[in-house]
Image (cartoon, rainbow, N blue to C red):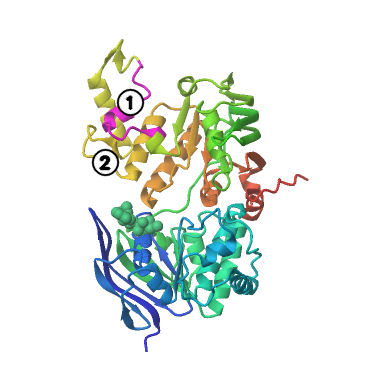
Amino acid sequence: MSENILEMRNIVKQFPGVLANDNVNFQVRRGEVHCLLGENGAGKSTLMNILYGLYDQTSGDILLNGEVVNISSPRVAIEHGIGMVHQHFMLIPALTVIENVILGMPENSQILDLDAASKKLMELANKYHIKLNPNDMVENLSVGEEQRLEILKALFRGADLLILDEPTAVLTPQEVEELFKMIHKLTNEGHTVIFISHKLNEVMYISDRITVLRNGRSCETVNKENTDKHQLANLMVGRDINLDIEKPPAQLGETVLEMKDVHAMSVKGVEALRGVTLDIRKGEILGVAGVDGNGQDELLECITGLKPVTKGTIKVNGEDMTNASPRNIMKSGVGHIPANRHKRGMILEMPVKENLMMIDYYKKKFANGMLLKWDEIEKESEELVKEFNVKTASIDTPAGTLSGGNQQKMVLARELSRSPVFLIAAHPVRGLDIGATEFVRTRILDERNRGAGVLLVSTELEEIMSMSDRIAVMYEGEIMGIVNREDATVSELGLMMAGSKRQVD
Ligand SMILES: Nc1ncnc2c1ncn2[C@@H]1O[C@H](COP(=O)(O)OP(=O)(O)O)[C@@H](O)[C@H]1O
Ligand SMILES: [Mg+2]
């Protein structure tokens, strides 16, 4: 008898043009929390989607309790006691809790009527101390509640081995704690959990063992007791990584951003900013924390002139820029690393050199009236590509063909080469690997140390905590409080992220 509940042997998954899994070996023991750790694109979701019957492997075997199985669909996976909660939830908002749970159940299943199903669901919910009303509409649930429902739904269907794909990405720290409690309860009762993550802190907290995937290959499985964050980071990246960010004390200068009672509407026509007041001075990083969708996008759009301000004022470098044009705002000394670089930061089809010059082309140095000085543009582009370590075949390569990290370095090169007085960095490392992350963060800190004021918006609390001098928390379009970094605790920030105003004594 094998002690492994699951063994995946030499799994290969070839997508057109992408080898997502390259001979992966992965073994999970009954009753453990096994983390699958790896950078974005390492092949974690693909491997688990194969296990859950969503994809066929190109080659390789899956063994459950020592027997080779053919998992041709999620239904077969469920029959084998495998449950999966995806990164993006798959519940239907217009249905009730219980309707979602029984939706898609086999027709010959025991649970035919809603009442019996509700009763069984409530028993499960009580067992895991989860508050739930089977008749609530799913659209009224919070993100955390939806996730708990997804887990219960998997258990309802008899999941013994539960796969959670990046489950903490959408949660507040308190919700993460609740989730971890639930995971412990599950494993105490004999369930097995595969926990996918790229966050070292939580991996070191929750797992028994950890398997690291890098570039589609499984590089090592380690016991939590025998490893640390540093080793895991090195395994993920394949080279030595410095996790600590060093930061001299802030040297504060004049105010670069001053927002007073700013209001704005969302695209849906509801008020998305409800009286935001904050300021940023030269030489400091103000981090804006919050769960995605609490007005951060609208905040950035108002500051950069992309969304009308319905009430209140915004001053940039002392000048009133309320409802000014994006062009005039940028010209007043603002640099912007946008959240969605494909939509706002670059033109994918244009060569790197034109992307680098997108904002400055009208300047004397690069243009003579209507004529562009291409030799100057090319010289400057070559220098920027070198300085910012942008890996590209040449400056004539279409920007869209670069990797995500190199696209971001290109945007960074363009924005920082203008020496902005005020830098806006929106989710600057989202989707980047550890190496590019290290580079981008260091450059942003350099700007602060040079004396720029920086607005950093991020949903990653770790990033906010390590970069910021002060931290503001947004919830439903309001600032719940602003805390100095030295005084900030994860639990206080977490409470504010969930909507409680800061208690000032
Ligand atoms: N359905 C698909 N078709 C083509 N390529 C895919 C598909 N799904 C994932 N990939 C590619 O496979 C690689 C691994 O992706 P994924 O398993 O999602 O990584 P992770 O979950 O570790 O971030 C990536 O390069 C991704 O772009
Ligand atoms: Mg994934």
Work out which residue is located at the far bottom of the displayed protein and give it: 1
Q: Which residue is mark 2?
A: 401
Residue 73 falls in image quadrant: bottom left
Q: Is residue 58 above or below residue 399?
A: below
> Which image quarter: residue 360?
top left
Residue 387 location, x and y as percent?
A: 32, 35
Look at the image and tell me in which quarter the C terminus lies.
top right
Position above or below: 470 against 128: above
Is 192 included in the stretch rendered in magenta?
no
**Residue drawn 64% across and 55% down?**
491
Q: Secondary structure at mark 1?
A: loop
Q: Is residue 447 left or right of residue 347?
A: right
- In this view of the protein, which residue sits in the foreground, 212 or 49? 49
Q: Secondary structure at mark 2?
A: helix
Q: Are discs 1 and 2 less than 8 Å apart at CB?
A: no
State the image coordinates of residue 81 (x, y, percent, origin top left): 44, 76
Q: Is residue 90 visible?
A: yes
Please name the residue shown 40% across and 37% down the image. Answer: 341
Could you tell me how far apart the alpha carbons at marks 1 and 2 are, in whole angstroms?
18 Å
Closest to the camera, between mark 1 and mark 2, is: 2
The span shown in magenta is 344-363
Q: Residues within 10 Å of mark 2 (few under 14, many from 20)?
A: some
- Does the magenta stretch mainly form a helix, a strand or a loop? loop
